[in-house]
Image (cartoon, grey):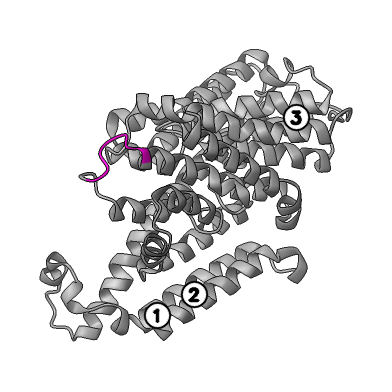
Amino acid sequence: MSFSLILISVVFTLGYTAIVLEHNIKIDKTASAILTAIICWTLYIMFSHSLVSVADLPHWFLEEQYVEKTDAQLISSWVGEHELLGALGEIASILFFLLGAMTIVEFVDAHGGFAIITDRIQASNMVTLLWIIGLIAFFLSAALDNLTTTIVMISLIRKLIKEHEERLFFAGIIVVAANAGGAWSPIGDVTTTMLWIGGQITTGAIIKGLLAPSLICLIIPLLYLSWRLKGRIIHAPDQAVGSDHTNITSGHRNIFFLVGIGGLLFVPVFKSVTHLPPFMGMLLSMSVLWIISEILAQTSPTKPDPALRITRILRQIDTPSVLFFLGILLAVGALEAVGLLDMLAHGLDQSVGNIDAIVFLIGLLSSVIDNVPLVAASMGMYDMATYPTNAHIWEFLAFAAGTGGSCLIIGSAAGVAAMGMEKINFFWYLKNISPLALLGYVSGAISYLFLF
């Protein structure tokens, strides 16, 4: 490995460590993530002449360069104008998706829409509520996706549980459940969707093959927490959020809930029909909700509260969490661009050999490195001539990449969202949830390989 690749790896490792030790070093993880990303890309473009050859650049790019440039200028232009902006485009689609989903959820929440659900959940026993929340998140994630489900469910538990320390266990289970639920659905997780679009898996086969292992991945952690938290009673909030807004009619509340949740459920349908990226469907749903809210505000007999307008809701969005997504995904994008992830994937292939063991390790690695480039590298390594549609490797890869990220709080989009929304400490999750997530992951993997 060249000096430049080693240097980029060291910077990423140091940045990742700073994110993990956020509370110890008292530097916000968002700042560390963004700084790490910028340094990694800066090093890449500085050493690009030794990492990229003009002969490797695509012909269409060279034909676009109307101005005479040196080889160094061509390479710098490729890295800065195409690789960086290409990676940023993919990341932006995730950020806009997140922005739209958070806006919809915050708007429904502000109008007391989730009371429709919370009023029907009467459990005061912590274990019973854990099972209810976990199973709802599991099946909801298959219909939505793990990121949206996490945002919705954490907003939901805030209406049910007063104490932050108690909510942390629920947030951890929501991350595990959302990732497990997304693995067996072609629209539940980005990596499963990649395999579905690529033709490696089909809808019926992935549901049949992974539903039971994914459910086991959730049930095992729930069984342990049922024993650990047996007899504990939850503390409900003194009053439901939104109850102080007396000018919100039940009719308007119900409309916003149905339009908001219906809009979230519409996103995968929109994607399947139009083949546009999911963020387009999410922004469409947000805009429809926005317009309906404006129309209802104009026709309402009472003066609407300005604090409940979407323009105000947008100001309340957790911007640091969105920027953290930008930083960590951009940093991982640098590793992908310089080829470190491809090297890692091929290194596993050569050193391990056994395909099941490789996929299992890829799942564990996805808790440290974003699972999207890992799966993309795997799809490039193993061709469909050798492993046709619905081959064992593709189903197991969907399970591993989808659920392995739960082992660390920053190992999945769901975990990062939960970390930002509930201010979950990395080491708290590592101590209390990571062993359970790992046990669930191993149990699900074993059940897939040997039982189903």
Image x and y of residue 151, in percent: 60, 38
Do callouts 2 and 1 mark residues in contact (Cβ within 8 Å)? yes
* Residue 113 belongs to magenta span: no
Q: Earlier in the sequence, mark 2 or mark 3?
A: 2
Name the side, left or right, on which 418 lies relative to 90: right
What amino acid does circle 2 point to?
Ser
Q: Amino acid at mark 1?
A: Met
Q: Which residue is mark 1?
A: 1
Q: Is residue 263 above or below residue 89?
A: above
Q: Foreground residue, 99 or 120?
A: 120
Helix or strand or loop: what does disc 1 sit on?
Answer: loop
Q: Quadrant of residue 26?
A: bottom right
Which residue is disc 2 drawn over? 9
Q: Is residue 242 among what the camera can see?
A: no
- Magenta span has 390? yes
Q: Amino acid at mark 3?
A: Lys
Q: Which mark is first along the chain, 3 or 1?
A: 1
- Quarter of the image where one finds residue 249: top right
- Residue 116, given in percent of the width and then of the height, sits at 67, 17
Check contact, mark 2 vs mark 3: CB within 8 A. Answer: no
Residue 153 appears in the picture as rendered: yes
Going from N to C along the chain, the mark reached first, 2 or 1, is 1
Does residue 203 sit above or below 252 in this rendering? below
Q: Which residues are magenta?
A: 386-392
Q: CA distance from mark 2 to mark 3?
A: 42 Å
Left or right of 109: which side holds 399? left
Which type of secondary structure does the marked residue at label 2 adopt? helix
| Tag 3 residue | 159
Task: Measure how far apart labels 2 and 1 are at the Cα level.
Answer: 11 Å
Q: Position of residue 112 (x, y in %)?
A: 69, 25
- The picture places residue 89, in percent across and down from the top left corner, at 36, 55
Badge count: 3
